[in-house]
Image (tube, rainbow, N blue to C red):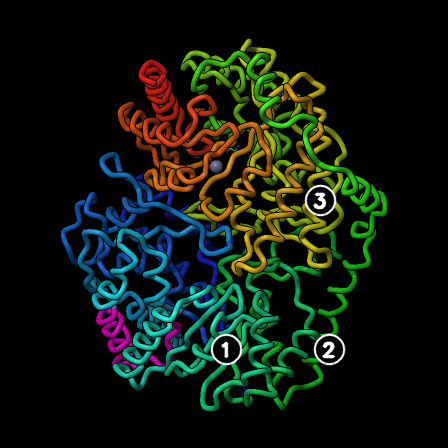
Amino acid sequence: MVRSSVLGYPRIGENREWKKALEAFWSGRIEEHEFQQQMQDIRLGHLRKQQEKGVDFIPVNDFSYYDHVLDTAAMFGIVPERFSYQGGAVPLSVYYGIARGTQDAAASEMTKWFNTNYHYIVPELNGTSPLLTENKPLIAYREAKEKLGIEGKPVILGPLTFLKLSKGYNPSEIDSWLNRLLPLYVRVLQELSAEGAQWVQVDEPILVTKLDEDDLTRLKRIYETLTASAPNLNVMLQTYFESLEHYSDIVALPVQGIGLDFVHGYAGNMKALQVHGFPTGKILGAGIIDGRSIWKASLHDKKAIIDEISRYVSEDSLIIQSSCSLLHVPVTVDHEAKLGSHLKNALAFADEKLDELVLLTKAASADSDTLTSEHMDRSQQAHKAIQLSDERNRADIHQAVKGILKQPLVRSLPFSERHAIQRDTWQLPFLPTTTIGSFPQTAEVRKARLLWRKGEWSPDRYNHFIREQIGEWIREQEDIGLDVLVHGEFERTDMVEFFGEKLEGFAFTQNGWVQSYGSRCVKPPIIYGDVAFTESMTVEETRYAQSLTQRPVKGMLTGPITIMNWSFTREDLPREQIAYQLAYALRQEVEALERSGIGMIQVDEPAVREGLPLKEKDQAEYLTWAVKAFRMTTCTVQPSTQIHTHMCYCEFHDMMNSIESMDADVISIESSRSHGELIHSFESNTYPLGIGLGVYDIHSPRVPAVEEMTSMIDRALRVLDPGLFWINPDCGLKTRGAGETIASLRNMVAATKFARVHH
Ligand code: GLN
Ligand code: ZN
């Protein structure tokens, strides 16, 4: 019999109960024991749901109090020295200290989980001595069994991936760290086995990237050791997000099951399966239901894939799975009352995907019945209906984009000439200061928006309120002494949603949240149709802000690639084309801003990196069209108009050329959270355009001292041309409080003044 399995379930709850509990605990509104109780209720609710739907292998220990990579580090006692940790189970105060920083110690770095918008906390190995502080998977396994009678499948992050994602060690030391970690993994697995666990899912997504011979040897050692020390426990070696790089080596590892992604790694994995077959006696976990898409699957196509796979694997050896954890999709379509029916019918979030999984598993079994095939047909129809809708077939947009693509997409003058013109136009001081765009979205701001959305406040009243905020913060910025000001983005909930609401082709869910980092959730819009500009989106607020000050106010837009990467997108059009449609729409906004007298325009592209394909061979193509979309957005302005861009959470070393060819007059980049490591990317490469490296971390409420920022500036100026250097925080300040924001920016300006004198 074919069986079904889920790789992980969203943590946040149907109504973001998880986020609310975390934040209540952090702010001291609830005590630890109440918090623990709430966490358990949420966790058990998720398990119960999967149980009721009839999933065969239900994951446990996929739940987390913040992030599963941090959990793994904490389980092994890997706590950076700057946090006072006394040994034993890591207390929540330390756990959240690592994640969010404390007044005395900076948070650990946070970075994107492979090519997703989920962020994990980077473990810092230096100075730590790994030990098993508590067996988290075991606790989760017991809980599911005792409370719900579920024979759970513990999920654990595999040793190789854990080490590769960690920092604080020299690559040559990897084996000595492995020597320390492996016995701890062995104990975790042995204890699980002793408790009666049948399967453990060991996640090794790093296996979809290129590995060298040493890594392959390491893998062999890891999995020989693990399986030999817990002979009664079945290990599902789980990969996702792409196809395996070293298929034959990996399927030959001495584990009981191999989990492969047949959605995002379809081409590579299917080909490998066809060429090399699959070892008899092993279980294949086939990732068939897309864990990263919100659309219903075309079940007949999925069934055909399963049929093909079944040529190589017997029914009893086949498990139908989600392609990855369902963490990346919202919880349920159920409560979405406001979506049009052809759209709503075409959607499947986590819970609906559980149904699809179970349905497909039935269909794949020999005793599949007619009811199953009726369900399949219905789902298939929904999938077709949206394809044929008018919104997806707009000739005007397709024509316009085609026409623009025939143009050269370059600024009228090269940077060196623009730079001279802009220097004369703007007359900025040496080392100009600015911010990234947003100022605190206080409770007051959020409440005002809610009242307006509910209709309790008239649009006039709301606009008046927004103008007051803009006014206050323009005065504040002048007072702090910043050179290039921003209006503060108070009217925006979110940098993507705001634009999506004003463009055509987008739809919005009421509750389609997904976790981005920690308690922070995002509600990605759905790009379901062709994208079109209808009216200006940012001109009013920006122009108002500019009317209040003599200093330049930067207009603030989200770029095409970021809008695309932070939205759920349609699957019937290549991503490249979606990006161009967005670029065409945003370019009309850039032109509108310029016409209204705004001469500095920032087009944020923080999400370029995460769209980068995991396989090297696919990267150049993506970067080429991503850069093209940015240039399409920005190339029509006057030479005196200064185009800024901004990126964060980013490793840049392998995309410096692309960043340069975006040809933005100024780029601001997050760098202080990586404790200055980013500067290496610029050392060997003299970046020829304007650049601001973030001088302080905005993810933490901590107010950095002037000297800290001075040293960041010094380091940067050692490698970058001071004449092109800007000073700014890492990112927008919307998640910060007003007090800490003002204090930090004052220190930043003080550090700048010091640097102006000393360079
Ligand atoms: N302009 C945005 C802001 O300041 C940029 C946010 C981002 O890079 N993620 O909030
Ligand atoms: Zn940013």
- Label 1 crowd bin: few (<14), some (14–19), many (20+), radius 10 Å: many
- Label 2 crowd bin: few (<14), some (14–19), many (20+), radius 10 Å: few
Q: CA distance from mark 3 to mark 2?
A: 39 Å
Tag 1 near tag 2, CB within 8 Å: no
Q: CA distance from mark 1 to mark 2?
A: 26 Å
Residue that mark 1 sits on? 285
Q: CA distance from mark 3 to mark 1?
A: 37 Å
Q: Looking at the picture, which amino acid does disc 3 mark? A: Tyr
| Frontmost residue, 416 versus 716 | 416
> Extreme left residue here?
86
Q: Looking at the picture, which amino acid does disc 1 mark? A: Gly
- Residue 607 in the image, given as x and y percentages of width and height: 54, 44
**Left or right: 727 as drawn, with respect to 368:** left
Q: Nearer the viewer, mark 3 or mark 2?
A: 3
Kindly report the secondary structure that dominates the magenta region of the rendered protein: helix
Q: Is residue 729 above or below residue 622?
A: above
- Residue 726 in the image, given as x and y percentages of width and height: 45, 24
Residue that mark 3 sits on? 580
> Extreme top residue here?
550
Classify the position of the N terminus by image quarter: bottom right
